[in-house]
Amino acid sequence: MEMPLFLVSNEPKERWEWVKQKFPHQTIVFAGDGINDWYCLREADLSYTVKDALPHTKANAKTIINRRGGDRAIAEACIRIDWVFKLNCFDEELIEWIFKN
């Protein structure tokens, strides 16, 4: 996959400004658990972090995923995004398996 890679500021507000400029007039979904993710999590339309994220990061996320980072947390976030936007991208059996295991 030839996807472009962007180096974005580590400063929380500068990072959010980059996101807004890159995706103007769009619904922004942000997932993060790092020390500098808090501002984007607070400002995004939908935001997700993991249950073992830093306290200030969790305090600014709109949704805290039931899993720890590295334990299929992104899979859970994708399913939640699918539900919010009614995309129906996932098979029900797969969804059940992810939430059971």
Image: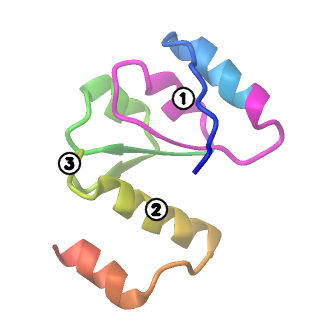
Rendered view: 33 above or below 14: below
**First reached walking from the N terminus: tag 2 or tag 3:** 3
Rendered view: 66 above or below 90: above
**Which label is found at residue 78?**
2
Rendered location of residue 54, percent (x, y) = 25, 27
Residue 32 appears left or right of 27 = left
Residue 66 appears left or right of 74 = left
Where residue 85 sits, quadrant-wise, is bottom right
Q: In the rendered structure, which amino acid carries the disc numbered 3?
A: Arg
Residue identifier under label 3: 68
Q: Which residues are magenta?
A: 21-44
Q: Quick one: which residue is furthest to the front in this view?
A: 2
- Disc 3 crowd rating (10 Å Cα; few below 14, some 14-19, many 20+) is some
* Label 2–label 3 contact, CB within 8 A: no
**First reached walking from the N terminus: tag 1 or tag 2:** 1
Q: Residue at x 60, y 38 (%)?
A: 44
Residue identifier under label 1: 40
